[in-house]
Amino acid sequence: MKKNIPTFASLTKQRDYRDVITSRLLPHFGEMAFAMITATTIHSFIDNLRRSKRTSGNTAKGKTAKPLSVKRIKNIIGPLTKIWASACNHFNWSLRDPFSGIADKYAQLNDRSIEQREKTSVLKFLNNEMDEVNTREVILLEEWLKVLFFIDPHYHAVMDLLMMGMIGSELEALMKQHIRGNSIQIRCAVVRDRGIVHLKFKPKNWFRKREIPMTRRLQELLNRSALLSTSEEIITFDNDIAIPASEFVLTMKNGATFNYDSFRKMVWDKALILANLPPKVPYASRHTFVQWALMIGVAKTRLVDLMGHSTKKMIDEVYGQYRQGLVEEREKILDYLGEDFLALEELRTHFPDRYRERMADSSKSPKIVRAPILAATFGQSFGQSQRLRADNYL
């Protein structure tokens, strides 16, 4: 921990490893010799992993805490495998790998989790009990508008950026220089760890450095927010970076630098209560964005870029929870996000009537299309396009 963790480029990774080691691994494996750590030991450890008292409300009522999700278990076992490999390399040990069958264990846990969910659902139905609310469940447009009604207009830009898939650390780091005409550039994040605040330029993965299309609605909201960001304070981060507060786009209602945790507690949570909706975390808007985008016809390959992922796996497996009622809201979702959120081909394919109306409007003010633009459309470089003649297009 003292030697290796500080070398990690990601502050978030440092924090996550430190938390896992101190709260999960050391209490269980701290006094064990490495030769005692076998596949059986690892599997037994996994089977007994439970939610902590801090995250599980059931323990306070005397009930057994729920098992961890497979994703969370992987995040705990990951550092353990690194420790194991590092120790074996350092001491030149030849020990049998206790993680060789871990993939089969994860598959078994997945099957068990699905079976348990189905069993719980049936039992609750028979007992006339309500299902527990998933705090990341997709939000219907009707519900979103109810929440928005109780949100101070000062934070409407925050709400729309959340709906575009941005997360809290990205919202805090959004600067005026990142707003570039037809797009919002996601380039950095504010990360907190044990009272230390860093401005991080290396994201979770490099795909998180992405661009979000700038719609007319977003442009108006961000212009208003940028005009209100006038503080003369200098924000000094712990990694020796100092930036004027006025360079950041978002602020709190009192003019202070935007703080995501304060927004969640004082604005988001209160609005949900006033809207008479079950508790949800703001991250639910990221899940919602995926389903809304798929519903109105955004190409999955473009959606992967918008979300900041490397493949479609996250879209298909993590964000793929459809919710009843979305289909009926399809037209209204497009009205809310704006037709200019869709690429022209997406609009033509999924909303042909609206596409024809837009083309009819644009034909009233014809534009001259230059040869280099046409050339680029057909895969030619700028240099090639400079020597094109009219008959080259025949």
Image (cartoon, grey):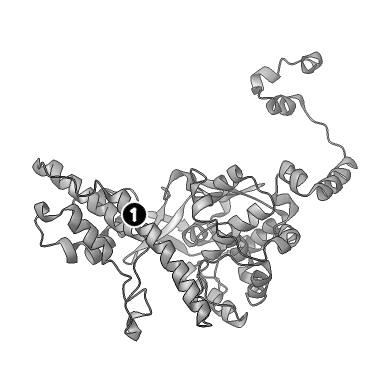
The answer to whether 55 is drawn above or below residue 233 in the figure is: below
Say which quarter of the image contains residue 302. top right
Q: Is residue 279 left or right of residue 195?
A: right
Label 1, residues with CA under 10 Å away: few <14, some 14-19, many ≥20? some
Q: Quadrant of the N terminus?
A: bottom left
Which residue is nearer to you in this view: 273 or 88? 88
Q: Is residue 96 visible?
A: yes
Give how far across and how far down residue 225 sits, in percent. Answer: 62, 63
Give how far across and how far down residue 43 sits, in percent. Answer: 24, 58
Residue at 64% x, 69% y is 144
The answer to whether 195 is drawn above or below residue 75 in the figure is: below
Residue at 66% x, 23% y is 382
Seen as rendered, the residue at the extreme bottom is 61
Give how far across and how far down residue 81 sits, in percent. Answer: 23, 50
Q: Is residue 62 left or right of residue 21?
A: right
Circle 1 — which element? helix
Mark 1 lies on residue: 106
Which residue is nearer to you in this view: 100 or 122? 122
Q: Is residue 167 left or right of residue 103?
A: right
Q: Quadrant of the C terminus?
A: top right
The answer to whether 359 is drawn above or below residue 69 in the figure is: above
Three-letter amino acid code at the position of disc 1: Tyr
Give how far across and how far down residue 353 sits, in percent. Answer: 84, 49
